[in-house]
């Protein structure tokens, strides 16, 4: 099989001791490509090093909304410089997160808009992080001329899913599908066309049912693949192939 993990933070320090072993295991079981989104500007250099020394890893650069307090205006200038110099496959992980208590919503919106403008001017897709803010994000996206993107760990409504798809976006599904009682996610995964779905782990976060309490890692995407295959009543080969086609086309992967 040819599987793409469309969202994995394999660059983080929690993987420093066994990153090589994990990546080797991924390749052996058919995970050929891993997309690595950024979080803060201070970690971009490490991320770029990790993807450079490992075949099949692809970088996205951006400023994560959860860490909005850490971002400064110079980070936007720096992002444009890094994009011009290092040619990431996407701008991300960016977005809005209104689930966080006492967050600065206006600062989030400002940084989101400025990063979308960088994506637009460089003809790059975006990788979205959205919690409790789908309508706000969709309203902003409508004002841009973007090359699509992914909405990772999608947990909105089916109607919102259709609006993302109409704007050229794919929707990310991962370990949450493996939980027996995740009825909303199961229903979404059944309804949304496979052509609009990406598989992901969000490692080291969002561990699946079989790995509760553990560090999540990209080779656990097999559990998500099996869960989606069951929900779609399709073979794992069919689901792996189509979701990989989706990711490769969206992010122009080699």
Image: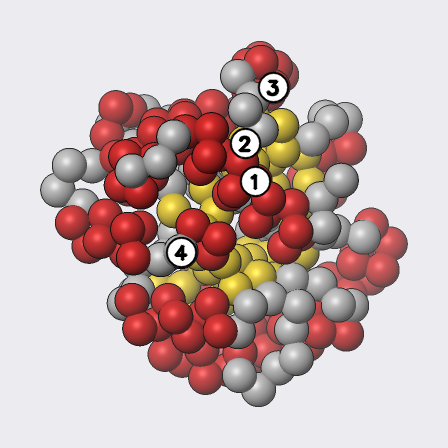
Indicate the position of residue 225 as horizontal and vertical percent values: 39, 33
Between marks 4 and 3, how big is the CA–CA gap?
A: 27 Å
One can see residue 80 in this view: yes
Q: Is mark 2 in CB contact (under 8 Å) with mark 1?
A: yes
- Quick one: quadrant of the N terminus? top right
Residue of label 2 = 3
- Mark positioned earlier in the residue sequence (2 or 1): 2
Dot 1: few (<14), some (14–19), or many (≥20) neighbours within 10 Å? many
User: Is label 1 in a helix, a strand or a loop?
Assistant: helix
In this rendering, position of residue 254 left or right of residue 125:
right
- Mark positioned earlier in the residue sequence (3 or 2): 2
User: Is label 3 in a helix, a strand or a loop?
Assistant: helix
- Any mark on residue 244, and which? 1
- Mark positioned earlier in the residue sequence (4 or 3): 3
Between marks 2 and 4, how big is the CA–CA gap?
A: 18 Å
* Most foreground residue, 234 or 248: 234
Dot 2: few (<14), some (14–19), or many (≥20) neighbours within 10 Å? many
In this rendering, position of residue 254 left or right of residue 198:
right
- Mark positioned earlier in the residue sequence (4 or 1): 4
Indicate the position of residue 72 as horizontal and vertical percent values: 62, 68
Between marks 4 and 1, how big is the CA–CA gap?
A: 14 Å
- In the image, residue 98 above or below residue 81: below
Q: From the image, state whether disc 4 or disc 1 is nearer to you.
A: 4
Indicate the position of residue 93 as horizontal and vertical percent values: 55, 56
Between marks 2 and 1, how big is the CA–CA gap?
A: 6 Å
Indicate the position of residue 63 as horizontal and vertical percent values: 58, 60
In this rendering, position of residue 119 left or right of residue 236:
right
Residue of label 3 = 27
- Any mark on residue 104, and which? none
Residue of label 4 = 193
- Mark positioned earlier in the residue sequence (2 or 4): 2
């Amino acid at each position: 099989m040819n599987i793409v993990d469309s969202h994995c933070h394999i660059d983080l320090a929690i993987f420093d001791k066994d990153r090589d072993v994990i990546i080797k295991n991924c390749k052996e079981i058919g995970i050929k490509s891993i997309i690595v989104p950024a979080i803060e500007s201070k970690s971009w250099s490490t991320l770029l090093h990790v993807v450079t020394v490992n075949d099949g890893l692809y970088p996205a650069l951006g400023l994560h909304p959860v860490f909005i307090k850490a971002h400064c205006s110079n980070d936007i200038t720096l992002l444009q410089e890094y994009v011009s110099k290092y040619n990431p496959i996407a701008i991300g992980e960016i977005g809005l997160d209104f689930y966080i208590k006492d967050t600065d919503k206006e600062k989030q919106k400002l940084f989101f808009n400025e990063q979308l403008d960088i994506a637009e001017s460089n003809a790059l897709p975006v990788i979205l992080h959205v919690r409790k803010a789908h309508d706000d994000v969709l309203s902003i996206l409508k004002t841009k001329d973007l090359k699509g993107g992914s909405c990772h760990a999608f947990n909105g409504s089916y109607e919102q899913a259709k609006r993302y798809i109409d704007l050229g976006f794919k929707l990310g599904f991962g370990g949450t599908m493996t939980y027996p009682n995740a009825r909303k996610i199961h229903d979404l995964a059944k309804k949304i066309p496979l052509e609009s779905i990406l598989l992901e782990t969000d490692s080291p976060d969002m561990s699946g049912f079989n790995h509760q309490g553990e560090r999540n890692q990209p080779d656990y995407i097999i559990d998500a693949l099996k869960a989606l295959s069951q929900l779609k009543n399709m073979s794992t080969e069919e689901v792996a192939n189509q979701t990989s086609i989706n990711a490769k086309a969206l992010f122009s992967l080699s």
